[in-house]
Image: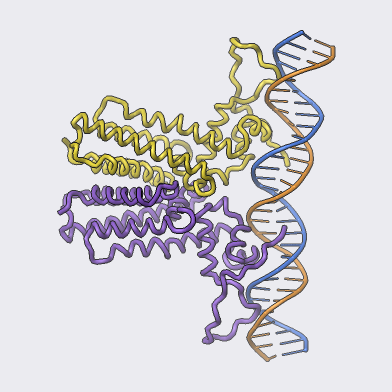
Chain colours: A yellow, B purple, C blue, D orange
Amino acid sequence: MVQKKKKLVAVAKPEVATEPKRRGRPRAYEPDVAIEQALALFRKGGFAATSLDDLSEVTGMNRPSLYGAFGDKRALYLKTYQRYRDDYTVPMVAIFKADIDIRERLRRFFDAALDIYLTGEEPRGCFTVMTVASDAIADPDIRELVYRGFADVDDAFGWCFRTAIKRGEMPDTVDVAALSQMASATLFSLSIRARAGVPRTELDVIVKGAIALLCGPAR
Amino acid sequence: MVQKKKKLVAVAKPEVATEPKRRGRPRAYEPDVAIEQALALFRKGGFAATSLDDLSEVTGMNRPSLYGAFGDKRALYLKTYQRYRDDYTVPMVAIFKADIDIRERLRRFFDAALDIYLTGEEPRGCFTVMTVASDAIADPDIRELVYRGFADVDDAFGWCFRTAIKRGEMPDTVDVAALSQMASATLFSLSIRARAGVPRTELDVIVKGAIALLCGPAR
DNA sequence: GGAATTTAATGCGAAATGGTACAAAAAAAG
DNA sequence: CTTTTTTTGTACCATTTCGCATTAAATTCC
């Protein structure tokens, strides 16, 4: 079984001369970059269909190096999951903090989501949703992670609608929980449709209709 | 590599004495039952994580028999997909044909969906949604299948809302397309949350809120 | 009874998979 | 220069995976 040839892709950064030099042969990769590359792969094929050879190839790291740096395949998957949340989910939710009205908030949020879901050669959708489909049943830890992920999304939308009520953008008679859950449902739907090949133009129409429905008649 | 011991689970039916007897050793399985068993497995783990040994075990068929009866693993997967649509999706949509009002229609539909998604030891969610996650990117044929599947769901909801308008249950000013897409989004969301371990009580609450939002103020 | 037919059962091959052991390479430290 | 440390690179292991070939078993037909 032949290990793949090294590819200087996840290239190590120049040493910053503020700490004692680290002994030993220098790393030929940058862990952060490697995780990002692994994430890209896992987003495409999921856990089971992505092999260590695939990961080795995309990162330019040999398999022993992958193990040394990240642990086993599952551990690497969990790291990529956390990276996805840090790099994509958290910045998305931060969009809500802008001082704009509810419709613009939602519009920007869903736009950002679509940018993420549709970036790359293939539309990959939301990694959290894909993870539920592939690993939630077999792995209770992962199920717990995604369960939490979905609850966080509901909460973010909840905050958003409560803020809209406070700012007088929505009547205080609305059911915030129901709206939040429907907004999350819209997000999941965009993810799934994107991955199923629905074009951006149609997804934009869905966003528009959802915002109209969620926010009610313009005030 | 040891082939698993046979298990008389997918048992052949008694021959109906209306045609010439078929030569050869009798089958020890019933193809329809085997497909159903395979479906159950694929619903749990998806394509890549379900091996032929797994399928062999659950159906009681040796691997050559699986190949002989259904073709390769992917062909079997496609057959199980079709079976899911025939056995679950089509009967669900048939619920809409009952002569009841829109709210009751949606309530029964989502209830039926939850029954399907939550039946079994583990909540498996909707097979179409799970299939998008696992195989849509690598396999254009499967992507086309699920794309169509989602369009069909949108259409069924569309029919439902147009019927409600005709029967005076909803105003004719509503955006039917947006409502349909939101209703589909609700369905996908239920599937994903079910698989993530959200309990039925919470899912029922989501259904209730969704129906209220989709149907607007009671008329 | 033997031949023909169909299916089950067993074994195998080639490749893939996740993971590890060990030697070689590349650096710092003394 | 040697020793220590860290990483790369190669090879290997044990198992699994998918698919197939062949033999044995079970039936019908003549």
- Up the image or down, D12 lies above or below A28; here it is below
> Which image quarter is the C terminus of chain B in?
bottom left
Q: Position of residue A160 (x, y in %)?
A: 29, 33
Closer to us: A179 or A42:
A179
Q: Position of residue A18 (x, y in %)?
A: 59, 10
The residue lying at 50 percent from left, 31 percent from top is A83
- Up the image or down, B190 lies above or below B2; here it is above
Q: Is residue B169 visible?
A: yes
Q: Position of residue B185 (x, y in %)?
A: 34, 48
Q: Position of residue B197 (x, y in %)?
A: 44, 47
Q: Is residue D30 left or right of residue B191?
A: right
Q: Is residue B212 left or right of residue B184?
A: left
- Up the image or down, B160 lies above or below B203; here it is below
- Up the image or down, B163 lies above or below B217; here it is below
Q: Quadrant of residue B38?
A: bottom right
Numbered-mark total? 0
Q: Is residue B181 visible?
A: no
The residue lying at 34 percent from left, 44 percent from top is A185
Q: Is residue A31 left or right of residue A168?
A: right
Q: Is residue B3 left or right of residue B84?
A: right
The residue lying at 60 percent from left, 55 percent from top is B51
> Which image quarter is the N terminus of chain B in?
bottom right
